[in-house]
Every structure is written in C-alpha cells, then in structure tokens.
Image (cartoon, helix red, strand yellow):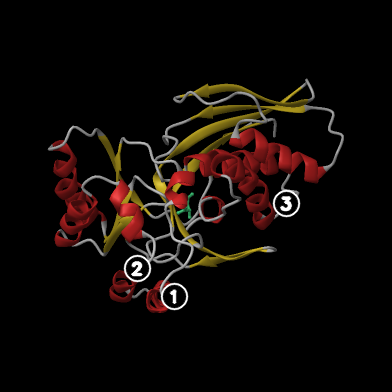
Amino acid sequence: MNEIKIFSPATIANISCGFDVLGCCLDSVGDEMVIRKTQEKGLKISKIIGEDLPLDIHKNVAGVAALAFLEKLNKDLDFGFEIEIYKKIKPGSGIGSSAASAAGVVFALNELLNKPFSKLELVEFARKGEELACGQPIADNVAPAIYGGFTLVKDTDPLKIIELPNLDNLYATIIHPLIEIKTADARAILPNKIKLDDAVKQWANVGSLVHALHTQDYNLFASSLTDYIVEPYRSKLIPEFEKVKNNALKEGALGCGISGSGPSIFAFSRGNQIAVNVAGAIKHIYKETNINFNIYISKINSDGLKIIDAK
Ligand code: HSE
C-alpha cells in the first residue's frame, strides 16, 4: 500500500459526567486525510484544505503525532510520507478537531506500514498532538476516534483505555455556535477544589452510564447524563446554553450537555427521528440571535476511523 485516504471522525468528549475520561465517536461528521509514501525521505504536510492551519510539522497536531509515531518506530525507512488534510471540523468547536487530525495521521501511517502498533500505542502518539493543541496530552477525544464507540480513559500514566459498548440506536444532534472557546481557557475557569457531594453524584453517574451501555438501558443512560461539576462553570461561556438544553430535553432527547470544552452542545436521542426533531427544536434558538451556527446529526460510530480508499 502506497497511499491511503481515510475518514477521521469528530468526537464528543466528557459525555456530561465523565470529564477527561469519557468520549464517543461520531459517524457523519469528520475530516478526510490522504497520506502517501514519497520517494523523498522524511515527513511533510503538503496540503491543508478548509482551514488556515500550519504546514510546519512541528506546529501542526498531525505533524507532531506523526513524528511521535516515527520516532517510536525508530526505523531508517527508504521512503518518506506526505500528508494532505481536508478539514471539515472547525478548530475550537469542541468536537475533537485536533484529535481527528492527530488520530487520523497515526492510524493512516500504521496501515501504510502493516500495523506495527496497537490502538493503545496510536492513542499515545495522537495525544502528543493534543498536547500541542491544548497544553495537555488529553486522550478523551483521540481514544474514541481510534477505538470507535464509547471509551473510558481509565488511566493516563501508563495509559489505559477501556472500550465500552455502544447503544444500538443512539444518535447525537450537535449544534456548534460559531464562537471560539479555547480549550485552555475553558480549563482555566474550572475550580481546583470541588464539593464532595457533587463528586459523589458525579462518580455515581459515570458508573451508571457505563452500566447502562453494557445493559442497553436507555433510561439509565439518560439519567446518568448530568454534570454537577464542570457544566455550571462552562455553560456561562455558551450563549443560550440553558435554552438549547431545555428545548432538546422537551423534544425527547435523552440528555444534553457541552461537547468537550465547547462551544458545541450535544444531545443524545434514541433513534434518528428524535435526533432530527431535536435539531429542529434547537436551531431556531440561535436563528433568533446574531450567532451563526452549524448543526449535525450523527449516529454513534462503533468503528472509529475508516479507510475510504487505499492503493
Ligand atoms: N476533556 C477535555 C475538556 C476535552 O473538557 O477540557 C477537550 O479536548
């Protein structure tokens, strides 16, 4: 294989109750990337379409993740690689834009080189890209992009990822108000100390959400989607958050919260039709403001990254 074209999915991190540990993978929202072997040795990003991002491999999350991969491979290859990135996920959207680029490139390199590394190792490389993007090697977006479905970051040192089951008919509606919230800023406003009462409720929710996934229990899943710790702080950064949440829940969503560090808001629904109804019920809220927005509906993607073409 000399060239591979991949779909690199958007992801929802935190899933309300699981700050920095839970994440899930979307299906119809994501970037495309082409990675090909070149006669010239080394690594270069030859093209980025859709966003103004650095081509310098040391300043681009995909470049940094690829370098981590090649450094661990530690082989004197007699060819190099070039990367083309077709960005469809806006940076700073809260649906794992940097994670898609970082996870995509290491997945593609692994395929081109006959899979020398495990998925866990790919997450290790990809989170180097996350470190460049948001100052910390967060894994809760790159893990679901690479594993698909729902994932739990059990530990970061050493890294341990647990693959969780998916609910068989689960859809996400995502609304992305086009304002910028930097992950670093959204982390900086969080408190260093939290109330024990809140922590107790929150870890009960993480446990019950995991159980709900294992038992296909939509009611338990819905009742686990409350964030007592982070959302009260971050929701203030997102105009109309409460209105969006209330309308989504009224329309039958199982739950609604901030996607990653925002500003995107996700709502989960059982079945596509409710997800479509939720989209209809929340988009008019931003239409009544001067804030532009994008809206997406996606099934939860159990497979993660996908190969579109290989030659
Ligand atoms: N868990 C992270 C956060 C996701 O909420 O800050 C951002 O990539």
| Residue at image location 70% in from the left, 63% down from the top | 158
| Residue at image location 85% in from the left, 39% down from the top | 75
| N-terminal-most mark, 1 or 3 | 3
**Secondary structure beneath label 1:** helix
**Within 10 angstroms of label 3, few (less than 14), some, or many (20 or more) residues?**
some
75 left or right, relative to 281: right
| N-terminal-most mark, 3 or 2 | 3
Residue 148, x across and y down, in percent: 50, 55
Kindly identify which residue carries mark 1. Answer: 203
Q: Depth-wise, is mark 1 or mark 3 nearer the camera? A: 1
Using the rendered image of the protein, determine whether residue 307 is visible from the camera's viewpoint. no
| N-terminal-most mark, 1 or 2 | 1
Kindly identify which residue carries mark 2. Answer: 228
Kindly identify which residue carries mark 3. Answer: 117
Q: Going by the picture, which residue comes out furthest to the right?
A: 76
| Residue at image location 84% in from the left, 42% down from the top | 74
Three-letter residue code for mark 1: Trp
| Residue at image location 32% in from the left, 68% down from the top | 226
Per the model, the C-alpha gap separating discs 1 and 2 is 10 Å
